[in-house]
Amino acid sequence: MEYNNLIQVSQYFKDEKTCKEHLAKLRWSGNVTCPFCNHDKVYVTKAGYKCANPKCYKKFTATVGTFFENTKISLRKWFLAIYIMTSHKKGISSLQLSKDIGVTQKTAWFMAHRIREMLRAKNPTMLRGIIEADETYIGGKNKNRHWDKKVKGNQGRSLKDKSVVIGLYQRNGMIISKPIENTTTKIIPQAIKENVKKGSHLITDELSAYVMFDGNYKHSIIKHAQGEYANGKIHTNTIEGFWSLLKRGIIGIYHQVSEKHLEKYCNEFNFRYNTKDFNEQNRFDKSITQCTGRLKYNELIAE
Ligand SMILES: [Zn+2]
């Protein structure tokens, strides 16, 4: 049986037992491992598992060490929420989510944030090849503000009450977007160095910070100020398309996003973009496989 739409998801994950089994399957790929000591011999018990390592012998279930641990919300609701959030191109408001799965808005808000945390790229890889690099400003539209709340000098690229997000797109590959402190000649090259392999070919607009590379990258510049938007392969159209999606989502669905949470929204939009060629079922499963990583018991114990 498939689960490629909401009805199928609801039917397939009909009870907690099915959800737990699915979680275990994706998490351990059939080879259950103790989340406390990483031992790979375990006993199956009525309530879950028991580690077979005599030094450990701890009991656990599939949710231990995941984002679902200690939750009072049923896995069924979590799964529905994850499906809804990862399949809606522009995202979904916590109010709508609360109605869809039958929880309070406060609970839905909390769940949505935890899910965004889960969607953060695990083991992110360095981008390589041809890379579109661009930045955008989120929030703070002066013209929508009451006169006494207007911020002076807020037109265009000012950070007085906006946040800046950098976006890096590897042609035919992944997008990475995340908030950065500012667009100085220090911060932007640093963000690129952390995410793009040396020797790659960067395509950017003419913003001065990008000019400051130290020769580690090939660099082509598209001159927007002169009305140039594409010159064969030299364009930043993909990343600009991503910005319009992100902005429509944030303005249309979330209305407003605090700087504190902006990174989580970027995670959400990155994940959806980077799985856009997946079918719904594979995208859902991919998100579930990212459920570990919040609490790593073996790391905690190693302290
Ligand atoms: Zn163990």
Image (spheres, grey):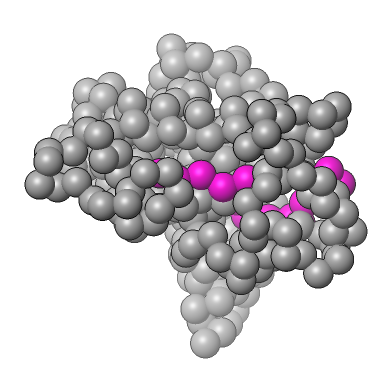
Above or below — where is 20 with respect to 49? above
Left or right, residue 160 beside residue 91:
left
Residue shown at 14% from the left, 47% from the top: 149
Q: Give the camera-side residue of 99 and 233.
A: 233
Is residue 125 inside the magenta stretch? yes
Is residue 168 inside the magenta stretch? no
Q: Give the camera-side residue of 172 and 64.
A: 172
Q: In x, y percent, where is residue 166?
A: 57, 51
Q: In x, y percent, where is residue 55?
A: 58, 82
Above or below — where is 284 with respect to 192? above
Name the residue at the bottom extreme. Answer: 303
Residue shown at 49% from the left, 24% from the top: 89
Left or right, residue 73 beside residue 37:
left
Above or below — where is 236 with respect to 267? above
Q: In x, y percent, where is residue 301?
A: 51, 82
| Residue 25, picture quadrant | top right
Q: Count all numbered tags in the image, as a single digit.
A: 0
| Residue 278, picture quadrant | top right
Q: In x, y percent, where is residue 154?
A: 33, 48
Quarter of the figure that contains the N terminus? top right
Left or right, residue 244 beside residue 25:
left
Residue shown at 49% from the left, 40% from the top: 268
| Residue 222 in sight here | yes
Q: Give the camera-side residue of 149 and 112.
A: 149
Residue shown at 75% from the left, 33% from the top: 235
| Residue 18 in sight here | no
What range of the chain is rendered magenta?
120-138
Name the residue at the front extreme. Answer: 226
